[in-house]
Amino acid sequence: MRKFLIAILLAAAPALSWAAGGHGAALMNARVDPNDTASLQNGAKLYVNYCAGCHSADYMRFSRVASDLGLPPDLVEKYLIFTGVKIGDTMQSAMSKQDATRWFGVAPPDLSLIARRRGADWVYTYLNSFYRDDSKALGWNNLLFPDVGMPHVLWDLQGIPMPEYSDVQQGEQTQLVVTGAKVIEGSGSMSAEEYRKATRDLTNFLDYMGEPIKAYRQALGVKVILFLLVFFFVAYLLKKEYWKDVH
């Protein structure tokens, strides 16, 4: 039975690797921090300005964002809500699913759990892997997610990444494939370092939406471990006291 389970895990390993890394692409470290309130606030701003036009977050409410991120409700209503909903409502997209399906063939996915499903490193790498591809209908492609059906919505921040090609041996043939991208200097409003920070903040917010209680859970976990260590010491002393006459 044990050998059978090991065989199944070994057989599934390539598929799991592909799903996590996107065709074997190396993932970047997002270094998300659920306790970095400033990062989460900036991520929320980027989300509503660049993502919420097409993508909904049906499992997150504006009121929860305001409470967790320390944002006054009136400022949330003024700067983060553009669809006319109330602050207690969920973060719905400005575009209805019916219109999205009619225009694009399929509605853009809900992003409430995207970081939890794909992983924060995947999301961060994806946001930093777009490049210009005039052969595509939208003019963009992605190194991590080839033939992506989404445009590079952050291009005005990053600039225009142009593809870089390398010769790759595939069997007996050598093919020229895209292995990287280089941003045209001055084409974006941010430097490379600023753009990485912005996408990290956006990833941090998406990771927060997938598990809003993550910061509390981690803090509680530390307290529980400390309690168990103290309890172990007390239990050890108690055991010695009970058994001192026996030994």
Image (cartoon, grey):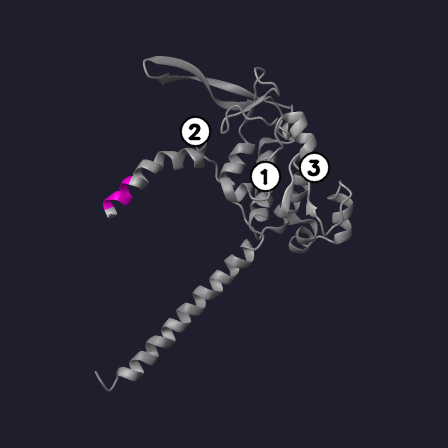
| Residue found 71% across the figure and 49% down from its top | 89
Measured in 3D between alpha carbons, the distance from the residue under mark 3 to the one under mark 2, in whole angstroms, is 30 Å
Say which residue label 3 marks: 49
Q: Residue 3: name its quadrant.
A: top left
**Mark 2 vs mark 1: in front:** 2
Q: Which residue is mark 1?
A: 197
Under mark 2, the amino acid is His
Q: What is the CA distance from the residue labelled 2 to the residue labelled 1? A: 25 Å
Magenta range: 3-7
Callout 3–callout 1 Cβ contact below 8 Å? no
The earlier-in-sequence mark between 2 and 1 is: 2
Local packing at callout 1 (Cα closer than 10 Å; few below 14, some 14-19, many 20+) is some
x, y (%) of residue 146? Answer: 50, 25
Magenta segment's dominant SS is helix
Image position of 230 with respect to 2: above or below: below
Q: Amino acid at mark 3?
A: Asn
The residue identified by callout 2 is: 23
Q: Residues within 10 Å of mark 3 (few under 14, many from 20)?
A: some
**Element assignment for label 3:** helix
